[in-house]
Amino acid sequence: MLQRFHGLAYFSAVLLFVTLTGTQAECPVKLNPWRAVVRYNGSVEVNCSASVPHKGMGWEASEGAVPMAKDKMMITWRVSHLTEWDIEPFCYINHEEQFQVQLPVTIYKTPDSVSIRIVNHRGPMIEGQQYKLQCDVQDVAPVQNLTVKWYKGQTLLNQNTFTEDSKTPLNETATLLIRPDRADDGAQYRCEAELELGAEGPQPPPKGTSRSLNNELYYKPKHSNSTETIIKNDEVTLNCTVKANPAPTYTWHSEHLKEEISSSVLQSPTLSPGNYTCTATNSLGSDSKVFIIESEQRVLYFATF
């Protein structure tokens, strides 16, 4: 039966020191690489070398064990399809005593699916209201290496990490609160589930991405300014067009208008000086703008003073 070494030990073989023949010496067992990051059902290969003569060396592992060999200074632990989540292989040599170095193994699995949705809501979103987005990540491992990143277009909004310590796949959920405004009309939200596995892991980090959530946004009309002064010349154009969703309807009011007008633009060479009020309305509200037409003669009159 193999005896486990109980001296001062670190996961990294490079930093492992033991008592050897009464003095401090570097551990004679080296692993290359010192840590293995393997995709589930993927292949792995790690070399173990001895730096001193020995009476035998080998690998103990539930998969890919290597019998003790006396005539080699390096042996390789090799598995073509690694599927044991909690595997803990270690390499040993029998010198004056037995030395062991355990190989840290991280087995990862990218998610089966990544999806995004709005919690408890259907239909268009309303400007200024708060909504919760939810990202569901299915069957991913290890979750302690998982980061869920939230994007609006190409802009990173937030990211979530997880504290569970599990080697086997789990389902995870992340949420994000948003309060969209009219500048977000047409914005696309998505979430990405990324496994950050360190320098020994694949680069760039493996990830799964949700579809883009492009939910319609409703917002009321809002003019950039409430009044506009125009000097009357040969033809006057009053443009009341404003962005809103649903599309607004328009009404005009002035003592100089004799008929009802429903277009967003009022254009005529016969418009008299005075005030013209345009109101844009949709199901969320309305907003008015006053156009003030002044005659050229009145402007010239005041300019002479």
Image: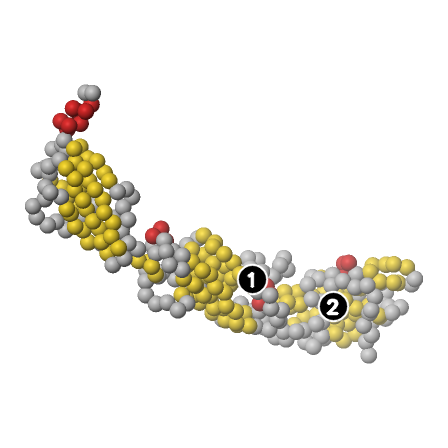
Taking the image as drawn, is residue 27 in sight? no
Mark 1 and mark 2 residues within 8 Å of each other at the beta carbon: no
**Around disc 1, counting alpha carbons within 10 Å, would you say few (fewer than 14), some (14 to 19), or many (20 or more)?**
some
Does residue 199 sit above or below 116 in this rendering?
A: above
Residue 189 image offset from top left, x and y in percent: 41, 59
> Of helix, strand and loop, which one carries label 1?
strand
Is 87 placed left or right of 298 in the picture?
right
The amino acid type found where label 2 is placed reads Gln
Residue at far top of view:
304
Q: Nearer the viewer, residue 135 or 282?
A: 282
Residue at far bottom of view: 1
Does residue 39 appear to the left or right of 49 in the view shown? left
Name the image quarter holding residue 163: bottom right
Farthest residue to the right: give it: 22
Residue at 81%, 76% (x, y): give it.
Answer: 2
Task: Tell me which label, 1 or 2, sits earlier in the chain.
Answer: 2
Q: Nearer the viewer, mark 1 or mark 2?
A: 1
Placement of 41 over or under 262, stated as above or below: below
Task: Please identify the quadrant where the C terminus is shown.
Answer: top left
Residue 102's disc is 2
* Horizontal side of residue 106 vs 274, given as left or right: right
In the image, which disc is placed on residue 161? Answer: 1
Task: Indicate the secondary structure of the residue bearing disc 2.
Answer: strand
